Image: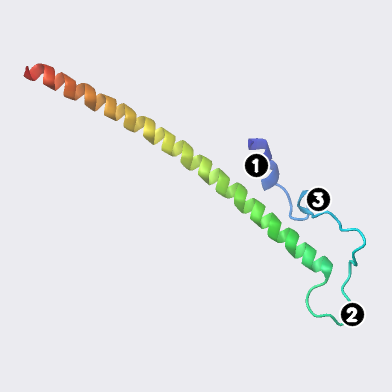
């Protein structure tokens, strides 16, 4: 998993992994006089959007993993503290009686 995350982080938006498959039989240019971006520009914008979305997902996933590890460590600390408190309470009860 770490290798996959490192690979995704190091890729460029134009990497073939982020390119949608070519659609056979489709015109790759825009018709003359048509407003808006050409199909190539639109495809490039879509690739860039998907790339940013993928990077965002990977970064969020890493933050979640770090948070999960931090929470696991805190849970273990609280469990140890709880066990120590239980022992202390038990010792006090034994001394009181």
Among numbered discs 1 and 2, the one appearing first in the sequence = 1
x, y (%) of residue 90?
18, 21
Q: Quadrant of the rendered structure where residue 31 is?
A: bottom right
Frontmost of labels 2 and 3 is 2
Query: What separation in Å lies between label 1 and label 2 (alpha carbons)?
Result: 43 Å
**Residue 43 x %, y %:** 79, 63
Q: Which residue is mark 1?
A: 5
For the point 33% across and 29% down, which residue is it? 79
Tell me: 86 left or right of 45: left
35 vs 68, left or right, is right
Q: Which residue is mark 2?
A: 32
Whichever of callouts 2 and 3 sits on the residue coming sooner in the sequence is 3
> For the residue carrying disc 1, how many other residues have a C-alpha within 10 Å: few (<14), some (14-19), or many (20+)?
some
Residue 84, percent from left and from top: 26, 25
Rendered image quadrant of residue 20: bottom right
Asked whether disc 1 touches disc 3, contact meaning CB atoms under 8 Å apart, the reply is: no
- Could you tell me which residue is drawn at 65 percent across and 42 percent down? 5
Q: Secondary structure at mark 3?
A: helix
Q: Which mark is residue 16?
A: 3
Instruction: Tell me if mark 2 has few (under 14), some (14-19) or many (20+) residues whose alpha carbon lies within 10 angstroms of its own.
Output: few
Q: Element type at marker 2? A: loop
């Amino acid at each position: 998993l770490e290798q996959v995350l490192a690979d995704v982080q190091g890729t460029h938006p134009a990497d073939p992994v982020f390119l949608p498959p070519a659609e056979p039989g489709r015109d790759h240019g825009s018709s003359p006089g048509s407003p808006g971006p050409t199909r190539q520009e639109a495809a490039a914008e879509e690739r860039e959007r998907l790339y940013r979305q993928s990077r965002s997902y990977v970064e969020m996933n890493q933050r979640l993993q770090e948070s999960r590890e931090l929470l696991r460590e805190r849970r273990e600390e609280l469990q140890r503290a709880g066990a120590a408190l239980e022992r202390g309470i038990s010792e006090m009860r034994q001394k009181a009686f």
